Image (cartoon, rainbow, N blue to C red):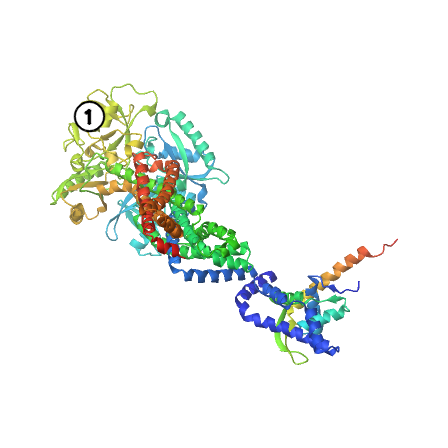
Amino acid sequence: MKPLRRIWCRLLGTFRGLLREDDLASEIDGHLRLMIENNERLGMTPVEARRAAVLQFGNAGATEETCRDQRGFPQLDAFLQDMRYAGRTLAKAPGFTAAAVAVLALGIGANSAIFSVVDALLLRPLPYGQPDRLMFLHQKRPAVPFYGVSWLDYLDWRKQNRSFEDIAAFSLGTFNLTGSGDSERLWGRRASASFFPVLRVTPALGRSFLAFEDSPAGPPVAVIADSLWRRRFAADPDILDRTITLDGTDYRVIGVLPANFQFPVVKPPAATDEVFVPLGQWNSPFKQERTITFMFAVGRLKPGKRLADGQTDLSRIERLLAAEYPKSNGGNEAEVIPFRDAVIGNVRPALYLLLGAVAFVLLIACANVANLLLTRATTRRHEIAMRTALGADRIRIMRQLLTESLLLSFIGGGTGLALAALGTNLLYRSAPVEIPRLGTVGDFGIDGRVLLFTLAASIFSGIVFGLAPALQSAAYGIRRALGESGRGLIGGHNWLRDILVAGEIAMALVLLAGGALMIRSVRNLNQINPGFDAHNVLTFQVGLSEVGKSPATTATAAAIRLAWPRLLDRITRIPGVESAAVASNLPMAGDNVSMPVWVSGRPAPRSPHDVPQAMTYTPTPDYLRVMRIPLLRGRFFTEHDNAASPPVVVIDDEMARSMFPGEDPLGKRVLLGGPDAGVSVLIVGVAGHVKHAGLDDDLTSKSRAQMYFPFAQTPDSFLSITGSSATVIVRTRSSPFSLINQLRGAVFSDDRDRTVSNFETMDQFIDATMTQRRFTMLLLSVFAAVALLLAAVGVYGVVSYTVSQRTREIGIRMALGARRNDVLKLIVGRGAVLAMAGVAAGLALALVVTRAMSSLLFGVAPTDPLALGTVAILLMLVALTANCLPARRASRVDPVIALRFE
Amino acid sequence: MGEKKDVWQGTLALMVLKTLDVLGPQHGYGIARRIEQISENLLAVNQGTLYPVLIKLEQEGSISSNWGTSDNNRRAKFYTLTKSGRKQLQAESRHWRQTTEIIDRFFAPEKA
């Protein structure tokens, strides 16, 4: 208690010190008087009495000093004094202050903005209990280019593992919400009863699933998201036990999730999960197949278990499964990854790159301000020498100068924070959709952590740019400074300034190189032909109301078979529509459906993972026309290829090449589903290959073969489950968005209970696959531009300083016969040497640093000579231009004026 | 050893508290005089030490101060023992007595 109280009093004392100064003086004075009176009473003469008292009292000034120190914190007093002084000094040089603050604000602001994003995505814990123990689990299958886990394998994982508290499975789904208002298509999940407990998420209202509900006989129950609860049910507190109709089935609402709940994995970026239903009660034939992997799993490690334990454990189970079910599970591997990695996906390298880039920007800013300070330091030499002469020691001077730097960087940081607030807003709006936004976690903006980071960045920069000038000033001898009558004849060479400027140029070059490499990558991507014509193609999701009540019925399938062609017929009659098709599994849209396929008549492979997979599209006949995918040979399917006719398939040229090398695939048969249980289908045509996952797809994709299977030939059992919702794609004659209302009308004219959602063009899909690169390119280019500007300013500053220092020297040279060109050469030459040194160092640095960004590049090496050469030349040109302005000024020096100059 | 001893740091605070306890409100000079008198002029109270101690005690809340008039009509700052100062004094004098007793035992002539 007492020490605390004392600190408080001293803090108060620091700020009240001035008020109470008189108090102390008069108290001491009173004391002295009492002593004198006492001495007089003892018989001394007044003079003697005073002398004795003063002698006895000792140094009154020192006493006061000690008391003052007691009363406040002397260090703090000195600091505040330094601050006041620094404030006055900065206010006296508004031009310098404004320049330094602007540069720092740019540097610190950019850092705070990027940090807020990095923090939200990489550093802050996920909004689940003990998120570090959450793991995302999936299978890697030899031939399948994407991951998942089958239902039966999941059940085995859950039963046989020893390192997870529990494992939950989930799949992504869409649901038609009908009744009570407009019908709506919702994104949602089928999830096991363990799902919410594993995440440690408790509904805000009601409860989550119970084990008996998560079984085939379980009653239909649903947990809904806060957003749906507010939107559809006006946040009705009595929502529990009400029913909602999803895909024609009545579900009882048993829980409402907390508002901040998000589950941002395995879903299209725009989708928000709004309903959850038990996975276990879903009667899907897919669930019985170990080869069908449309689910994912999330597990919570037991306390003390690590990722590696979980990995070893699941690998062990996978080996057991492979031994037991060699046909379906041979060659499968399990993969355990931290849940956060699954959430943020592949943005990590881009974020680290940007963080590194802004750090460079800040360093350049610091170098710039340090240079400004150094320039000022020379003009302040006198002041500092005077202070030294008056008794300030070196430490005290350095402290004073550092305080000034810190004040400067705090002002810069504060301004930078305002910039960062603007910047994050901009980032948020232009961020690629692939950057997951994690509810409370992903809302990047200015918060306490960003404030703290900004504070740290400000202190860091204050010290970085302040230290060198402070050291130099403090070291500058008094006699030298006081003895100098202003400027010397020949300006001293200041190596520190040269190094700073060369360093700035080097760092700017690295940033420019990064920007150039990104620009080249994006350009390369833009030149890639996706294999289809994306222009003027609109896509949207339609959900039919003919939904298979489980178990699947032939009647539902028949209704679905009728409904789609009728809808397409209505759509094609809209003026402005050129053609339309229904499709599943669109390229670039994040859809992935693939199937094992084997050429009929060839001997079955020894190992099941030698069976290749082909990306499988199931469209209606006009698909190729809508997408303008070239038909290379044979025919595409027609309306006559229906459920009653023999099954046919169209393959792409990649599949033709890889499976029928040197043969004509037309008329051959393949087994869809693999050599054992596959359905034999006839190849009737060959179409062009399409980039499926993105324009850079083929560099990474394992499976390139593609095939088209008629939508109409989908078996009843599948169609009644999956066929009620599909993507409609429409090629229009002009801008497709103008037709949205008519398209909606066409969908609803047959049935009001349908849903329409997600109008997006193919162009948007392609764009979305590039946004991360484009975003990185944009930011990196902005940073590089800022760096270039700062470096140019830095060069300009140093050279003009040199010129002003050497005016007399130049005057003498000219008086002795030097011509203007000689002077120009003298000055430009020096700047050129600096620029060249910087560029050389930058190139060396870039060769090392750009390698870190190779995963973001496309079609260009991190050491691309064209990109590096271009930026080196650009930087040299800019540096020389910045050099020439002051050099020209130097060459115009009038020797007469220069020699009198002083 | 005719020289006066300076008061040891730390014990001065205790002496100040005790003085105020015995004499009631007192100014700095009075406190110094009293300590010197009690010590029969063996101790000299250095004002350079006394005033910082007074400030510290006041900051800790053991004493409080007020401006008043001294016996001979001079303005002076009077220090008063507070309730918590009294408690502190009691605790510390107990502690002091214990310490001195222990030290005494060490230096007491050895008995057979």
Q: Is residue A402 left or right of residue A695?
A: right
**Residue A180 seen by the camera:** yes
Relative to the observer, which residue lies in front, A616 or A278? A616
**Number of disc labels:** 1
Q: Is residue A433 left or right of residue B80?
A: left
Residue A698 is drawn in which quadrant?
A: top left
Measured as percent of width and height from the top left, residue A854 is found at: 35, 36
Relative to the observer, which residue lies in front, A310 or B4? B4
Amino acid bearing label 1? Ile
Q: Which residue is mark 1?
A: A683
Measured as percent of width and height from the top left, residue A414 is found at: 40, 57
Measured as percent of width and height from the top left, residue A131 is found at: 44, 44
For the N terminus of chain B, the image quarter is bottom right
Name the chain under label 1. A
Say which element carries label 1: strand
Relative to the observer, which residue lies in front, A388 or A57? A388
- Residue at the bottom extreme of this rendering: B73
Measured as percent of width and height from the top left, residue A103 is found at: 37, 52
Q: Is residue A675 left or right of residue A87?
A: left
- Residue at the right extreme of this rendering: B112
Relative to the observer, which residue lies in front, A354 or A491? A491
Count residues near mark 1 (Cα–Cα under 10 Å), then give few for <14, some for 14-19, many for 20+: many
Q: Is residue A547 above or below residue A398?
A: above
Residue B97 is drawn in which quadrant?
A: bottom right
**Residue A545 seen by the camera:** no
